[in-house]
Structure formats: C-alpha cells, structure tokens
Amino acid sequence: MNDIDILDWFTDTEFFGVSMANMALALAVAVVVYIALTLALRLALGRLRAVSSHTGTHADDVFVEVLSGTNRFLLALVALLIGVGMLDLPDRWASRVSQLWFVALALQLALWANRTVTVFLRRHAARHGTPGVQTVSAATTLISWGVRTLLWAIVLLAMLSNMGVNITAFIASLGVGGIAVALAAQSLLGDLFASVAIAVDKPFEVGDFIVFGSVAGTVETVGVKTTRIRALGGEQVVMSNTELLKQTVSNYKRLRERRIVFGFGVTYATSPDQAAAIPELVKRIVEESGKLRFDRAHLKAFGESSLDYEVVYIVLDPDFGLYMNEQQRINLSLMRELDAMGVGFAFPTRTVVLDASTPLRFSQVPAEAAAG
C-alpha cells in the first residue's frame, strides 16, 4: 500500500459518519490545546506566586491555592472537547458534546469551590488556633462537611438536570425524607447546630476557664453533641451543647483586668481625723504597686460595732495568683499602718450598760412572781 492509498484510506474511512482524517486532526488539535492549557496554567501560577510573595494580603495567596487545584483530567477533557468541536458531528452527538462541556465546567467549578472551602477553614483554624487543636479541628470538620455536602449536592442536581433527568420528584422525596430524619433526630440535630454555633460564635474555646451554674473548669473538648470540661476538683463534666448554650457562661480566659472590691472595719474609738486619713492611707498602699490601679476608698457606713470602709482597685493582669499576692500585701500593710496610727481593727462586740441608780427591791416584785 503506497502513500496515496494510505491517504485515501484516511480520507474515505469513516466511523460514526466522521472520516479518519478529521479524527486525526481533532486529536492533534486536542493534544496541542492540552499542552497550551497546561503551560498557560503553569506560567500563570508561577507569576501569581511571585506577585503574592511581595504582597501583605491573603486574597492572592488563596487565589493561587485555589487555582493550583485545577484538575489535569478535566483540562484534558476540555482540550478533547475543543478538538471534537472541529468535527462535523450529527445532531445527537453534538448535544452529548454540549452536555460534556457542562459536566466538565461544573466539576471544575465545584473543585475550585471545594478547595476554597478547605483553604478558608484551614486558615480560620490556624488564625483562631488554641492548644486544643483537636477540638477546633472537630468543629472545623463539621462545618466543612456541611458546606461540601451542600456544594456537591447542588452540582450533582445541576448535572442531572442538564442531562435531561427530571429532578423535581427527586428533590421532593429528599425534602420529605429530610423532614422525617429531622423529626427523628431532633435532639441530636439541636446539639449539632449548637456545636456549629460554638465553633462560629466562639463564646469559649479549648483551654478557656469558664464558669456556669455550679461548674467551674477548663474546656477540654467541644464535640458534635457534648462539651467536656475539666472541673477544679479534677473530675470531667460532660454537658450537652444545647443545654450549655442556654447557660450564662463567664469566660475567665478572656479576662484582661480584675476589678477588686474589699472592705474592712475599724473601731469606734477612731477619731474623726484618723477616720478621714484612712482613705488616703489605703490609696498610697495600693499605688505602691505598678500592677494595680487605684479606684476609690470611702468610709461607707456605720456598722453595729465598726466604722466600715470599702476599697476598689483594678489588677492590671488577669493572673489570679498575682491578685492574691497583691491583696495579701495590702492587708499586711494596712495592719502595720493602722497599728502605727493607733487605730484598731473592729470585731463584733456588744456593750451592756447597767443602770445602778434605781436598785431593784424585792418589795417591787409582783406577788405572783415572788410566789412562783
């Protein structure tokens, strides 16, 4: 067989109404387009990485990560479809090619969206990371699972609709089934959404010291259904996420300053001048430490057996041990300074005064009492 015969064979031989020559041309075009797309993608990624390395924003970094997730198989499919587009196909094959175009583009957009979710959740977890990485990862995984499920469900339904499948009944059946599942697992779904609320709103995180009700402890785990707290006594407290969010939670990990109010009393033997000097004395003692900020000190009230003072100051560090050390220093200084002033601390006393000017005589006692 000579070259002319081979050329005639390529020209005359047809498959599905398309000559071999046209198929070879379409394949060659597809290969060239694939190589061109691959090189263009590589050059674009290289250029974008160079630009993002010199900027302070994270948007270009996210864009580079998302674009690097372009699927090579889908690139090859796009190149093949471009090559097939050069063929004179029958109408029934042309409609199939248009459907493949939609599938390829939908899948690639879904992959980019999926990668975007991954990048944003990873960066969010890194930005709000705490020593308890496992719990943050659990909440992140929960959100990621929900977003990905919704994304791929939409893509699948769109592809089925493009292929001519009637998805109305399918969506209706999913809706009825979803309602039935939601009613059957109402408590579990409530805790599930509460877990998502904790992960998004972050009223507390792993490692935070929280107090609610009679429970005080450090958060160890925020799971899908429950939150586990290591109490001060050493035991682990397990509580439903839904019930926990109904509580008023005090988060001491986010404490920046401590406002301290304490009081003391001195005896009524204290003179007015001494009583007036005590607030200034307390102010001087508090301000001796650079870790405290004085607020006020006042003679608040006349007690049953004492002159009552109230003192307010701010500890500029949330450390509880520092607060206790400073309060101890203030108490000891007050003891020394008041003793030097000749002022004593008050304690509960009661004075009984007997009037001896009118002595009680036996004759004054009623006869019934004397007889008794």
Image (tube, rainbow, N blue to C red):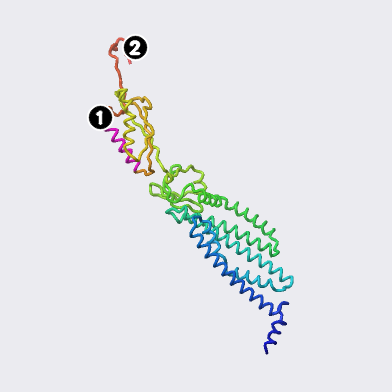
In depth, the one of 17 and 1 nearer the eye is 1
Is 87 in the magenta?
no
Q: Residues within 10 Å of mark 1 (few under 14, many from 20)?
A: few
Tell me if residue 66 comes above or below residue 188 in the rendering: below
Residue 22, horizontal then vertical, whole percent: 69, 77
Tell me if residue 7 comes above or below residue 133 in the rendering: below
Hey, which residue is sitting farthest top in the picture?
A: 363
Under circle 2, the secondary element is: loop
Residue 347, horizontal then vertical, whole percent: 31, 28
Quadrant where the C terminus is found in the figure:
top left
In depth, the one of 46 and 228 nearer the eye is 46
Which residue, given by chain and number where applicable, does mark 2 sit on?
366
96 sits left or right of 356 in the view: right
Q: Amino acid at mark 2?
A: Pro
Residue 291, horizontal then vertical, whole percent: 35, 41
Chief secondary structure of the magenta portion: helix
Is 323 in the magenta?
yes
Tell me if residue 53 comes above or below residue 258 in the rendering: below
The quarter holding residue 63 reads: bottom right
Q: Which residues make up the magenta segment?
A: 322-339
Residue 126, horizontal then vertical, whole percent: 47, 55
Hey, which residue is sitting farthest bottom in the picture?
A: 1
Which residue, given by chain and number where applicable, does mark 1 sit on?
340
Which label's residue is closer to the chain start, 2 or 1? 1
The quarter holding residue 349 reads: top left
Q: How much space separates mark 2 and mark 1, taking CA atoms?
A: 55 Å
Under circle 1, the secondary element is: helix
Residue at horizontal 62%, vertical 71%? 33
Q: Amino acid at mark 1?
A: Ala
36 sits left or right of 238 in the view: right
